[in-house]
Image: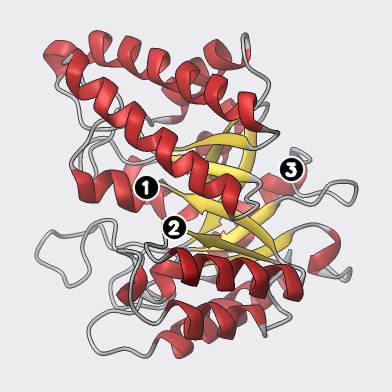
Amino acid sequence: MQESIFNYMKVGLIHFMAYPETVKGEGPILETVGKIARDDYFNAIEITTIKDPNVRRKVKKMLETAGMTVAFSAQPQLLGSGLNINDVNEEGRQKAVAFCKQLIDEAYEMNAVGFAFLSGKYTEETKEEAYRALIESTKELCSYAKSKGNMMVVHEVFDYDIDKKSLVGPAILAAKYAKEIIAEFDNFGLLVDLSHLPLIRETAEEAILPVKDYLVHAHLGNCVVKDPSMPGYGDLHPRFGFPGSENGVEEMVEFLRVLKDIGFLNRENPPIVSFEVKPFGDEDSDLVVANAKRTLNLAWARL
């Protein structure tokens, strides 16, 4: 593509993944958010909970000053809490919904345009029951979010049998789920992540085309899936070019091509497309972020 990438997307970075020492809502949040906010390559940032109200206020002001679009990620908090939004135990499901509502409040406080979450684990024996629980929970979250403003509620499609073992994906199930929610709520959409495609065993077309009418957000990342004994195996979002990994420039080109072909990447309302990359071992976070930017630049030039 000869046109600027910024005509077609808001390039974002998932803060707590690039700087994992902040994922629990503590640590050098101001310093690391500041790095992202000062980098004009990024028009968007994805944050998660920030425990200290004073730090939240400072981050909010920083991002407002920098003119950044903010999205909120509940995924790490749900995973860390052990709560399951599609728990077939009603008490457990209600606890997960209440937890997410608290995070929705925080997302609104931070002026987030979207609130992302994931479905939880399931068993084949109770899969249909878990699916109905997911539908009920999602409708509750959409209703709650809508009562407070215009923020989108966004479900990220994850793997179903390797790492997170979430109820949704694959793409066909994600499409069925989204169609049912959107029949009642217009503030819902799906998030597709390049790094999850090899984990779900789907090509870009297989992952995106079934959900094209519901897609509102995308992630760019990598994974290792060939052998469980390999370093970085699973859904760990290693840098592009990581040994034994699946995604590089060619895979990103194909992912972006499909997103552009369906009109998701567009000039009228550019969506958020964020890097989800994480340093492995003693890797430097800033170098991992620089790697991601270079990979996208090469992919965009070849699109």
| Label 3 CA crowd tier, 10 Å (few <14, some 14–19, many 20+) | many
Residue kind at label 2, given as amino acid type: Thr
The quarter of the picture where the C terminus appears is bottom right
Circles 1 and 3, Cβ within 8 Å, touching? The answer is no
Badge nearest the viewer, 1 or 3: 1
Q: CA distance from mark 2 to mark 3?
A: 25 Å
**Residue 44: image location, x then y, percent:** 66, 64
In the image, residue 163 sits, relative to residue 185, either above or below, namely: below
Q: CA distance from mark 1 to mark 2?
A: 8 Å
251 horizontally vs 69: left or right: left
**Residue 64: image location, x then y, percent:** 72, 68
Q: Residue furthest front?
A: 54
**Earlier residue among tags 1 and 2:** 2
Residue under numbered circle 3: 264
Q: Quadrant of residue 148?
A: top right
The quarter of the picture where the N terminus appears is bottom right
User: Residue at position x 48%, y 25% from top?
Assistant: 141
Circles 1 and 2, Cβ within 8 Å, touching? The answer is yes
**Residue 93: image location, x then y, percent:** 25, 22
| Label 1 CA crowd tier, 10 Å (few <14, some 14–19, many 20+) | some
**Earlier residue among tags 2 and 3:** 2
User: Residue at position x 41%, y 47% from top?
Assistant: 74
Residue kind at label 1, given as amino acid type: Gln
Q: CA distance from mark 1 to mark 3?
A: 23 Å
Q: Quadrant of residue 153?
A: top right
Disc 3 is placed on an element classified as loop
Residue kind at label 3, given as amino acid type: Phe
Residue under numbered circle 1: 75
Of residue 194 and residue 58, the one placed in the foreground of this image is 58
Disc 1 is placed on an element classified as helix
Badge nearest the viewer, 1 or 2: 2
